Amino acid sequence: MIGLTESGALDYADCGIRINAIAAGSIMTDRIGALPEEQRAPIAQAIPMHRIGLPEEVAATAAWLCSEDAAFVTGAVVSVDGGQLARA
């Protein structure tokens, strides 16, 4: 996904087309929401922010990437994961 995002961004940058990706972590989808609390708690604790993300947080990132505020952003992979990838 990262390679496709970066190569697509380079291929289409001169056409004014921006290509970015969102790498979402654990998000409170119907599937995760259906889990009992005792199964959700360890998921949240594994995230540096100690909570599961909300769909609205991913949507806000997508809206920002589509906006003029991100007009100079292309080839980026934006992590919306509460810091999970930062842990390395």
Image (cartoon, rainbow, N blue to C red):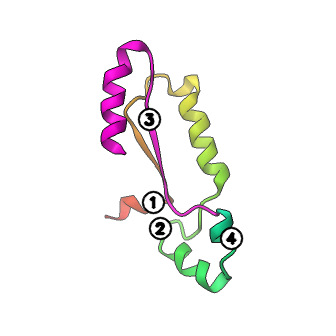
Task: Identify the residue shown where x is 45% and y is 60%.
Answer: 83
- Mark positioned earlier in the residue sequence (4 or 3): 3
| Residue 11 placement, left or right of 78 | left
Write down the quadrant of residue 9 in the picture. Answer: top left
Q: Three-letter amino acid code at disc 4?
A: Gly
Say which of 82 and 38 sits in front: 38
Q: Name the residue under label 2.
A: 48
- The image position of residue 73, as x and y in percent, is 43, 28
The residue identified by callout 1 is 83
- Residue at 59 percent of width and 27 percent of height: 67
Q: Which of marks 1 and 4 is nearer the N terminus?
A: 4
Which of the two marks, 1 or 3, is nearer to us in this view?
3
The residue tagged with tag 1: helix, strand or loop? loop
Q: Distance between the residues labelled 4 and 2?
A: 19 Å
Q: Does the magenta stretch include residue 6?
A: yes
Three-letter amino acid code of the residue under disc 3: Asn
Q: What residue type is labelled 2?
A: Pro
Query: Where does the magenta region start and end?
Result: 1-28
Real-space Cα separation, disc 3 to disc 2, in angstroms = 24 Å
Asked if 40 appears above or below 10 in the picture, the reply is below
Q: How far apart are marks 2 and 1 (CA)?
A: 6 Å
Query: Are the two marked residues, 4 and 3, in contact with CB atoms closer than 8 angstroms?
Result: no
Mark toward the start of the polypeptide (3 vs 2): 3
| Cα–Cα span, label 1 and label 4 | 20 Å
